[in-house]
Image (cartoon, rainbow, N blue to C red):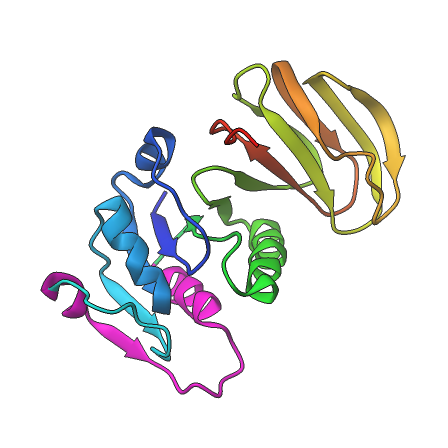
Amino acid sequence: MSTFTILLGGDLIRTPLLDRQVAGTRVIAADAGIGHARTLGLTPELWVGDFDSVPADLPADLAAIPRQVFPAEKDSTDGELAIAAALERGATSLVLAGAFGGRRIDHAFLHLALSLRLAERGTDVLLTSGAQEGIPLLPGRAGFDYADGTLFSILDFSDLSGLTVSGAKWPLDHVEVAFGSSLTLSNEVKGRLEIALDSGRALLLAHPFPLPES
């Protein structure tokens, strides 16, 4: 398996878990995502984009990274182009770091939707901000090693059929979930979290890092 970390322009905090997830991966930065290279102590092998959001005062080692330059008026986002570059280099697994938040909610939505399409084509995808992470859910059964009390939601991108959730404060047993329903929001891990799905498109959104006190 060849894992690439894609540095995107959304929110990112460094955590021990994130350090483990990106350790030993190949790295490609998408435009402003180069700023996260400093945060994580990573050196990308490629920097992709139209370079309209380059952080100021980049250190010389990051400024010298090979670039793949695209025009500002194009049919794909910088993030999608960076992912395409990783796939061309043989990526079978992706860590999308900085996939959430930031100034562009449209880009964040694209990362969620694109992760589902990639997963359906056989690419493992993890979306992360350090504080929260997303994992596409395909039909079948999957288990997740989160600590008790971890907050999670299942985001539906279509009607869901035969959804079963065990190892949770509020389990579900082979239920139907209408697209746009809030039934699967704000649950908590209680034991070994396992999720089964007969059909539909969904994404597990978990908060493995403690949330700040409000």
Question: What residue is drawn where x is 20% and y is 71%?
Answer: 66
- Foreground of the two, 99 or 126: 99
Q: Magenta segment: does it hold 208?
A: no
Left or right: residue 71 versus residue 177 is left
Question: What residue is drawn where x is 21% and y is 46%?
Answer: 41
Question: What residue is drawn where x is 24% and y is 58%?
Answer: 44
Left or right: residue 137 versus residue 45 is right
Residue 147 place in picture, x, y as percent: 52, 17
- Foreground of the two, 59 or 27: 59
- Which residues lie in the magenta part? 60-89
Left or right: residue 138 versus residue 115 is right
Q: Where is the N terminus found, in terms of image quarters? A: top left
Quadrant assignment, res 91 = bottom left
User: In the figure, 172 relative to 154: above or below?
Assistant: above
Q: Magenta segment: does it hold 79?
A: yes
Left or right: residue 177 versus residue 123 is right
Q: Residue at the top extreme?
A: 191
- Foreground of the two, 133 or 122: 133
Question: What residue is drawn where x is 35% and y is 51%?
Answer: 4
Residue 214 place in picture, x, y as percent: 57, 32
